[in-house]
Amino acid sequence: MAGNRFRYGQWNGGPDPLAPPYDVREAVDAVGAEVLAGGSLREALRDLLRRGPQGRGGLDDLAARARRLRREAMRRGDLDGAVTRAQALLDQALAAERDELRGRDDDAARFAEAVLDNLPRSTARAVQELSGYQWASDDARRSYQQILDQLRDDVLGQRFAGLREAVRASADPAAQQRLAEMMGDLNDLLARHGRAEDTTDAFAEFMRRHGDFFPEQPETVDELIDVLARRAAAGERLMNSLSERQRAELSGLMQQSLGDRLAGEMSALDANLRALRPDLRWGRGERVRGDQPLDYADAAGALGEIGELDDLLDQLDQEHPGATLDDVDVDAVARTLGRDAADDVRRLRDLERELRRQGWVSRDAEGLTLSPKALRRLGGTALRRVFADLTAGPRGQHDLRSAGAAGEVSGASRPWEYGDEQPLDVVRTLTRAVSRAGPTVPVQLAVDDFEVVETEKRASAAVVLCVDLSYSMISQGRWGPMKQTALALAHLMETRFPQDALQIVGFGREAMTLTQHELAAVEPDMEQGTNLQHALRLAGRHLRRHPDAEPVVLVVTDGEPTAHLDPDDGEALFHWPPLPETIEATVREVDRLSRYGATLNLFMLGDDPGLRRFVDAVARRSRGRMFTPDTDDLGEYVVSDYLRSRQSRR
C-alpha cells in the first residue's frame, strides 16, 4: 500500500523459520562421537537414521508406532463374522418360514417343513439348497436374500472400495451384468499387461468405460494393479486365517452370493493379480482375535491393514542389503501412521540426501559409510580431544636449517641458481624485472631477475602404528581410545606433517594394513590370537618403501604375543600360553626392525605381568621405550611421543 514504510531487522521470533529441520554437521559429529567411543561405524550411521536427528523422529519411533497399530489390528475381532452373521440370518429366515408353515394345513406346507428339517448343518450348503426354495413367508425370503446381498456387497465393496452405492445396487441383474463386464474387461487388460504388451490405449479405454468403479483414478495400469492387488491379497489372507471348516463355509457362501459368472471373473482377477504382484503376502494367515464379530469387509480390511503394516515394518527395518530410505513407501506411511509420520520419513530422506550431496557419506554395497571428508572431520575431532589433554608448550617445531623444496616457507627469498627446486617468488621476480627494464609493457624477464622462495626443510619419517584388534580391546573398554588415537595421529600427520608417511597396521590372529576409513569401520577380531610378529613384518615392509625417511614404529597392545605365522605355509598358529616359537618369531621381527634403525616404542594397556615382562624386554632389546598409559591417556601419550621424536631429529 502506498505510503507504508517497512523496517527490516534480525529475526528474533524463535527458531529460524527458513532453517532446515536438521543440522548436517551435527549429525556427522554424532556419528563420529559414537565411533570414537568404540562403536561400529555402520551401526552409528544406522543409528543416526533409526533414532533420528536429536534423537527424535527416527525409524525406530515409526516402527514402534507401526507395531502398536499391528497389535491393535490383531485384536480387532472375530474373522468368522461373515459366516456367523449368515448363520444368524439363516436361523431367522427358517424360524419365520416355520411360523408361516405352521399356520397352513396342506400337504405342500408339510412337504416344505420336511425340506427345512432335512437341510444340511453347513450354513453354506443350506443356503445353496435353498436357492430354488419357494418361500411362504415374505420376512423369511427377505432374510434369506439379505444373506446373499450383504455378502456380495461386502466382497465387491472390499475389492472396489469407494463404490458402496454402486455395489449395493448389484442385486439388480443389470448392475450385475455391468459388474461382470467390467471385471471381464479388467481381466483382459491385466492379462495383456502380464504379457508385456503395450496397454496404454487399452487402459485409457478401460478407464473411460469403467472409471466410476475406481474413485482413486489411477493414472497407469501399474497404479491400478497396486490398488487391486493389496485388496485381493487381504481377501486371500482372510481365507488363510480361517479354520478349514470356516474357510469352506465362507467360500461356499461367496460362490452362492456372487453367482457363477461374477465368481469366475473374481477368481480370474485374483490369479492375474497374484501373477503380477507375487511379492505380496498371498499365502500368509493371521491369528486375529477379538469378541466383536467382523463382517467380510471389516475382516479383510483388518488383515489388509496388518499386511500393509508388515510391509512397512520390513521397509523401516532397512535390513536387506542395499536398503535405503527411498525404499520406504511414504504414501503407505501416511495411510497407516498419519501425515506427521510421513513428514518424519521425508525429513530423514532429506537428511540422508543432504549428507550425500555435501559429501559426508557415500553408499557402497553394504549401505552408508563415511566419506574421506567426514573422516577428516572425525580425525580433527579426535586430534582436538588429544590436544585438549596435552600440556601447553611448543610441539613439533623440529626444523633443520638446510633449505630445500620439501619444506615450509620461511618468508625470505634469494636469486635462482641452476638446480633449484624451490617455488618461484613471483612478486620479487617481477619487481626485479621492472627495476631493471623500467615500467614497460609487456615486462621482459631475464635469467638474473628470477628469485625463489626460501624454505626450511623438515626431516621426513616413515611411521607405522600397530594397533591391537583382539577382542580383549573392546571387552576391556580400550577400543574407542585406540580408534581415537589412531585417527588423531593420522589427521595430525596429514595436516601438519604431510611429508611423513603413516601406515596403520591392525593385528589379531593375523595382521592387516588399514586405511583411515577401514580403521573407523573395523570390528574386533573374534578369533583368539595376538599376532605381533605379523604386524611387525608388515611394519618393516612399509619402512623399506621409504628408505630415506626416519623409521618409527609405535605398538599399542593389551596382550603378549600368542600367535605367529608358520614359516612353512604362512598360516597363523595360536596357542595360550605363548609358545617359545611365537616369542622367538616375534623377537626376530623386532631385531630386523632394530637393524634397520627403527625406533620401536610400545604402549602397554592393562597390567598383565606376562605382557609387562615381554614389552619391557622388547623395549630394552630395540633401544626403544615402554609406556603404560591409562586408557583415557593413550592418545596423549602416542601423539606426544610422535611429536617428541620428530623434535629430536637432526
Image: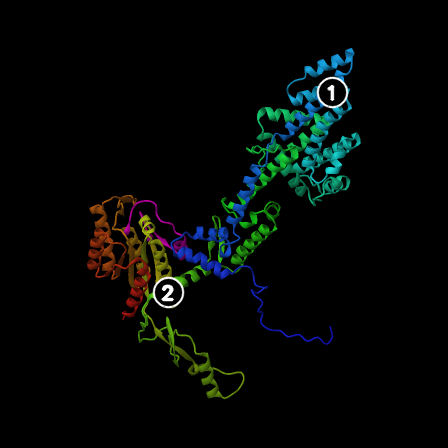
The answer to whether any part of residue 144 appears in the image is yes
User: Is 611 above or below relative to 236?
Assistant: below
**Residue toward you, 619 or 99:** 99
**Residue toward you, 43 or 343:** 343
Span colored in magenta: 506-532
Please tell me how crowded label 1 is: few (under 14), some (14-19), or many (20+) other residues with Cα within 10 Å: many
Quarter-of-image position of residue 260:
top right
Q: Position of residue 400 (x, y in %)?
A: 31, 74
- Find out whether residue 521 is within the magenta segment: yes
Q: Could you tell me the amino acid type at mark 2?
A: Leu
- Find out whether residue 209 is within the magenta segment: no
Quarter-of-image position of residue 542:
bottom left
Residue 94 located left or right of residue 66:
right
**Residue toward you, 145 or 59:** 145
What residue is shown with label 1?
97
The answer to whether any part of residue 549 appears in the image is no
Q: Which residue is at 46% across, 88% downward?
A: 435
* Residue 210, disc: none
Q: Position of residue 522 (x, y in %)?
A: 39, 51
Q: Position of residue 325 (x, y in %)?
A: 54, 50
Q: Which residue is at 25% across, 62% downward?
A: 597
Instruction: Tell me the mark number nearer the camera, choosing from 2 and 1.
Output: 1
What residue is shown with label 2?
492
* Quadrant of the drawing holding the C terminus: bottom left
Q: Could you tell me the amino acid type at mark 1?
A: Glu
Q: Position of residue 492 (x, y in %)?
A: 37, 65
Question: Which mark sits nearer the N-terminus, 2 or 1?
Answer: 1
Point out the residue furthest to the front here: 103
User: Is 428 above or below relative to 579?
Assistant: below
User: Is 390 above or below relative to 530?
Assistant: below
